[in-house]
Image: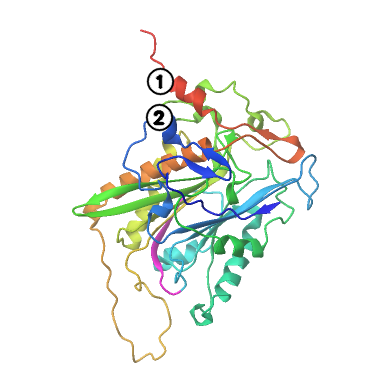
Amino acid sequence: MTTSHDTTHGTDVRQTLRQGNVMTVRARDWGFPLLGEPGRFNAITDVEGVLVGYQTTIAGDGDLSVGQGPVRTGVTAILPRPENILTQPCAAGVHSFNGNGELTGAHWINERGAMSSPILITNTHAVGPCHRGVINWANSQPDRSIAPAWIFPVVGETYDGYLNDIDGDHVSAEQAVAALESGKSGPVLEGSVGGGTGMVCYGFKGGNGTSSRVVRYGETRYTVGAFVQANFGKRSELTVCGDPVGSRLVDYPNPIESDPNWRQPPGSGSLIVVIATDAPLLPGECEALARRATLGAGRTGTTGSHFSGDIFLAFSTANPGQLQSTPPLDPDADLVNENLEFVPWGRMNPLFEAAVQSVEEAILNALVVNEDMTGRDGRHIPAFPAGHVRGAAIQTPAV
């Protein structure tokens, strides 16, 4: 079963969103004491113009048969400038906290300080078809002239092989295009959808999460939004709003860390973080913003496993039309300098704080907005017991 998840639009956009026919409860609904002022949807789509789309495939049960399933996977699309990202790049920066993973296009982003591609996130062995899908999508635009002579697609990945038939080629270039074409603004689906479908986080069902913060800059209000594909963390390290709950959940069902047939050390996996903002930033400031994702992830307890590929990208939607990288038609003409408006480095701290807070909450949402999942070979991953944890978090220690 392959599904295209459309973002639901509704009148109640406080913190509870509808996914299909199920009302989902996010971290803030449980009363976890999260800091900062979220945007309207508390999502990366609070940054005006940013769209998110999904394709999800859940099919089959029982023993693994490579190429047949069971399948628990998909692809997520994030479009920074849906109408013209190919010709109007965004200032961008990448930070690799631990490089045991992949984010294609990162070398070119670091070289020029800008990004001219949508972002896809999928499983580790589906990077190739998603890469091809971005190229096909670019070449299929109604105005063919906007497709550049070449494109370096931005595709990130995390490993879903514990639950999914990862070697079975269940993500196609066509699905990648469909995810891009399904992108919408507004509330964002979280949990086990798109690229996050088969992911595990701190021994619980992981996947996608998002959050945002409003930053006041004089009379101006900027937004910082984060999106995560969370597939990392050792159970005993899990921390929720400063409370080391993982140490109290070591006896809670934890199949992936107790499976004798699973050879990966606890904490293996990966974390992809995408941070968007409408604040005007220099490329170096975008890279600095991406680095702050490390602190947001750290607030949830991880110490950064060697076996976890933790790669973070930040971009700014401001300054459209600048940071071009097209060859001049006439070397002696078009000698026009570009101009960037940007927040001074000395004023970046509120944006850094917003990024840290957004990433922390996005990871918690990936855990909270989820349910148990059984995948290949009957492997079962439990959902995060938010109600139990919230009750434990507010208990008063005996004196």
- Residue at the extreme left of the image, as rendered: 218
In magenta stretch: residue 303: no
Where residue 16 appears, x then y in whole percent? 46, 40
| Element on which disc 1 rests | loop
Left or right of 281 in this view: 115:
right
Q: Is residue 104 left or right of residue 186?
A: right
Q: Name the residue rendered at 47%, 59% in the picture.
A: 51
Most common SS among magenta residues = strand
Q: Is residue 327 above or below residue 65?
A: below
Quadrant of the rendering where the C terminus is positioned: top left
**Residue of label 2:** 31
Whether residue 308 can be seen here: no
Q: Which residues are magenta?
A: 87-96
> In x, y percent, where is residue 298?
43, 38
Closer-to-camera residue (155/56): 56
Q: Amino acid at mark 2?
A: Gly
Is disc 1 surrounded by few (<14), some (14 to 19) or many (20+) residues within 10 Å?
A: few
Q: Is residue 381 above or below residue 252?
A: below
Say whether marks 1 and 2 touch (CB < 8 Å).
Answer: yes
Q: Earlier in the sequence, mark 1 or mark 2?
A: 2
Magenta stretch containing residue 88, yes or no?
Answer: yes
Check disc 1 and report the residue beneath it: 394
Residue extending farthest to the top is 399
Q: Amino acid at mark 1?
A: Ile
Q: Nearer the viewer, residue 112 or 326?
A: 326
Q: Residue 57: in sight, yes or no?
A: yes
Q: Is residue 397 positioned above or below 66 on the image?
A: above
